[in-house]
Amino acid sequence: MTKTVLHHRRLTKSSVNNNDDDDDERQNLLEKTQRSQDEDRWNATNEKFHQFDHIPWKGILLALTLTLIGSVIVIVFICSNFGWIAFKPDDNFTFLTLAFITLVPGLYHCMIAFRAYRGYDGYSFDDIADLN
């Protein structure tokens, strides 16, 4: 056991001079990593601001309108089938098809707009049609 302790002491004494070099290397590596992280943060922030250069407000408004109309149609259909309201559509299939045609694209584009606003990878406002 004393042999191991003495050997360890010799190693630590001889490596004292090498420790300064190791500390310099660690410091340089730490500075490079910090610079890299700062650049990544700047790029991410810059890209996020670049995303908001042009927001297709008319397309988002159309998506919200379609979602609202589709939701109202589904609610009216459910209420009429349970007898809560007196309205009875002549053809249930046509009524549900109209709800499907308005609700699905509206929800899809609202989801894209929300995720683009939140900055999720792969989503941008360029994916929504600009109606100008």
Image: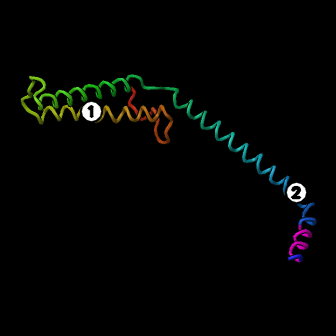
Magenta: main secondary structure:
helix
The way the protein has been coloured in the rendering is rainbow
Query: Which residue is at the front of the view, 45 or 77?
Result: 77
Q: Residues within 10 Å of mark 1 (few under 14, many from 20)?
A: many
Q: Is residue 124 left or right of residue 11?
A: left
The part of the chain drawn in magenta is: 3-11
The picture places residue 128, in percent across and down from the top left corner, at 40, 32
- Say if the magenta span includes residue 131: no
Q: If you read the primary sequence from the N terminus, does the residue marked by circle 1 or circle 2 appear first?
A: 2
Q: Specify the label residue 79 is tagged with.
A: none
Q: Is residue 89 above or below residue 120?
A: above
The picture places residue 99, in percent across and down from the top left corner, at 21, 32
The picture places residue 47, in percent across and down from the top left corner, at 57, 35
Q: Residue type at mark 2?
A: Asp
At horizontal 19% and vertical 31% (from top left) the residue drawn is 98
The picture places residue 37, in percent across and down from the top left corner, at 68, 43
At horizontal 91% and vertical 68% (from top left) the residue drawn is 9
At horizontal 8% and vertical 32% (from top left) the residue drawn is 91
Q: Residue type at mark 1?
A: Leu
User: What is the secondary structure assignment of the residue under circle 2?
Assistant: helix
Q: Residue furthest left?
A: 90
At horizontal 34% and vertical 36% (from top left) the residue drawn is 108
Query: Which residue is at the front of the view, 49 or 99?
Result: 99
Quadrant of the snapshot with the N terminus: bottom right
Q: Is residue 38 above or below residue 28?
A: above
Q: Is residue 107 left or right of residue 118?
A: left
In which quadrant of the rendered view does residue 77 lie? top left
Query: Which residue in the protein does label 1 denote?
Result: 103
Quadrant of the snapshot with the C terminus: top left
Query: Which residue in the protein does label 2 denote?
Result: 21
**Structural distance between the alpha carbons of marks 1 and 2:** 66 Å
Q: Is residue 32 left or right of residue 130?
A: right
